[in-house]
Image (cartoon, grey):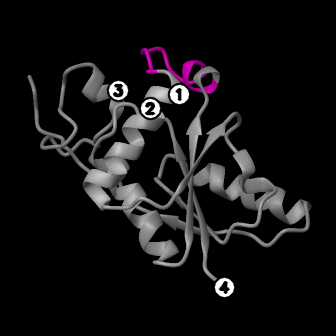
Amino acid sequence: MAPKVAVGGTFDPIHDGHIALLKKAFEVAGEDGEVVIALTSDRMAASQRVRPVREFDTRARILKAALREHLGVKRFRIEMLHTVYGSAIEEDYDAIVVSPETEPIACNINEIRRENGLSPLRIIRIEYQMAEDEIRISSTRICSGEIDAHGRMMV
């Protein structure tokens, strides 16, 4: 049976760390698997940060374009994420790809899945992508003008 892999985020702006996360999700799914990208809703995105975030439809369009451009993939599903758990606590997934920042959420997802009688997900953690200054690339740093999407210093 082909694997079904979950990955999630706000993806605004998309940077090399996001591309690495998504690339790993597609590697785990393989050619016959399915990747479900949980993209945070506007309300959830706004509640988790103080900086402005583009609206869901714009982020989804940019995400689709980035997946085609950087990974050459066209087969995936984007779902709106309203909570940190999304459909991963109830649907039949095999794996979840996370960063160090979101790994604890994946562990909580597995606890809830067990309580719901579902098999735990295989948690695949990728490391942060580092900027030139050896601090992780983040959308916040990009939005503040400190680095670009590839981690190159702007100041």
The magenta segment is: 44-54
List x then y, in percent, for residue 130. 23, 48
Q: Quadrant of residue 3?
A: bottom right
Marks 4 and 3 in Cβ contact (< 8 Å): no
User: Would residue 60 be visible to someone looking at this image?
Assistant: yes
- Sequence-wise, the earlier of marks 4 and 1 is 4
Q: Is residue 126 above or below residue 54?
A: below
Q: CA distance from mark 1 to mark 2?
A: 5 Å
- In the rendered structure, find residue 140 and report the number of the disc placed on it: 3
Amino acid at circle 3: Thr
- In the rendered structure, find residue 59 and report the number of the disc placed on it: 2
Name the element at disc 3. Answer: helix
Q: Quadrant of the N terminus?
A: bottom right
Q: Which residue is mark 1?
A: 56
List x then y, in percent, for residue 147. 18, 31
**Crowding at label 1, few (<14), some or many (≥20) Cα neighbours within 10 Å?**
some
Amino acid at circle 1: Phe
Q: Is residue 3 above or below residue 72?
A: below
Marks 1 and 2 in Cβ contact (< 8 Å): yes
Q: Nearer the viewer, residue 143 or 92?
A: 92
Q: Which residue is mark 4?
A: 1
Q: Nearer the viewer, mark 3 or mark 1?
A: 1
Name the element at disc 4. Answer: loop
Name the element at disc 1. Answer: helix
Marks 3 and 1 in Cβ contact (< 8 Å): no
Amino acid at circle 4: Met
Q: Is residue 129 magenta?
A: no
Q: Quadrant of residue 47?
A: top right
User: Would residue 11 be visible to someone looking at this image?
Assistant: no
Residue at x-position 48% and y-position 74%: 28
Residue at x-position 76% and y-position 66%: 92
List x then y, in percent, for residue 107. 67, 58
